[in-house]
Structure formats: structure tokens, C-alpha cells
Amino acid sequence: MNDSLVETMQALRSEPARAVDLYRELFEGSFIVLVQAGSEASPESMLFLTYPSTGGQQLPVFTRRDYILADMRGDAIAVSLDGPVLWPRLLEVIGPETCTVEVDPGQPHGIRLLRNMVLGMVAKYGEVPS
């Protein structure tokens, strides 16, 4: 499902030129997010769960079910969302100083995305919410 995306993330350290493909692959990918139980009915109502991280909070996003955090909260529900739905919605949640998005946290290929990175990706490949 996200094999090309994971391959690109794994190759970034040794092949930085692969970064040109990263935003498109992230935007087009399918992901698993953790939301508060009872809010999973629709993307608009989802309450995304964040976790402490160095420098603030992280909102974890996973490319595969087997990457999901072992210590996720008891009220967490894992929900699958396609990138074109996920990323614009996350722009409503993450802030420049308050929260980052962590794609596959804890994995060697995991990456951290700041709000301006997500904004650039959505502006290029999708629609920025008003």
C-alpha cells in the first residue's frame, strides 16, 4: 500500500535527492491515525490523539498497522484515512509551536513534519482549508 513511500523515507539519508518525491507520496498515501474513541465517525469530527515528544507534542501517523505505538492510550481507536482527506484536516489540528506530525515514529525511517511542511504539501497537491 505505502511501499514506495516507506522506500523513499528509508532512502532519504543516503539519497537526499529522493526528497522531491516525498511530498507527493505522502499526500497520495494511505495512513492510520489514532483518534479518541467515539469521534471516529467522520474525518471532520475526529479528535486526533497527540503524545509527548521532544520539544512539544507529536501527532503520530502510521504507514502500516504493525508500526502503531505499543503504548497507545486506552481511549485510542486506529482509523485509516487517505492522504487527500488526512493532510488538510491535520492543518486544523497542528500548530507551528504546539504540535508536529510524526510519520512512523519509532521506526528508523520515521520523519517529523512541521506545520509549514504540511501546508506546502497540501497547497501543492490538494486544497488548503479556509
Image (tube, rainbow, N blue to C red):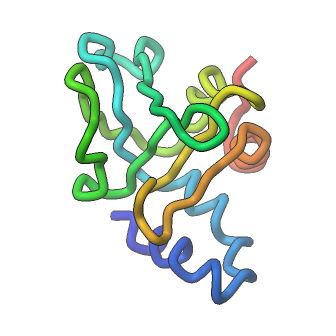
Q: Position of residue 5 (x, y in %)?
A: 49, 68
Q: Give the answer, above or below, for where 89 lies relative to 24.
A: above
The residue at 53%/48% (across/down) is: 102
Between residue 1 and residue 39, name the one nearer to us: 39
Q: Position of residue 36 (x, y in %)?
A: 32, 18
Between residue 52 and residue 120, name the one nearer to us: 52
Furthest residue toward bottom: 14
Q: Give the answer, above or below, for where 23 lies relative to 57.
A: below
How many numbered dots are placed on residues in this image? 0
Residue 74 visible here: yes
Q: Is residue 2 left or right of residue 10?
A: left
Between residue 80 and residue 51, name the one nearer to us: 51
Q: Give the answer, above or below, for where 23 lies relative to 18.
A: above
Q: Give the answer, above or below, for where 127 lies relative to 106.
A: above
Q: Quadrant of the C terminus?
A: top right
The residue at 25%/16% (across/down) is: 37
Q: Is residue 124 left or right of residue 10?
A: right
The residue at 47%/15% (across/down) is: 44
The residue at 47%/78% (across/down) is: 7
Q: Is residue 87 left or right of residue 31?
A: right
Q: Position of residue 62 (x, y in %)?
A: 39, 50
Furthest residue toward front: 54
Between residue 12 and residue 22, name the one nearer to us: 12
Q: Quadrant of the N terminus?
A: bottom left
Q: Position of residue 79 (x, y in %)?
A: 29, 34
Residue 85 visible here: no
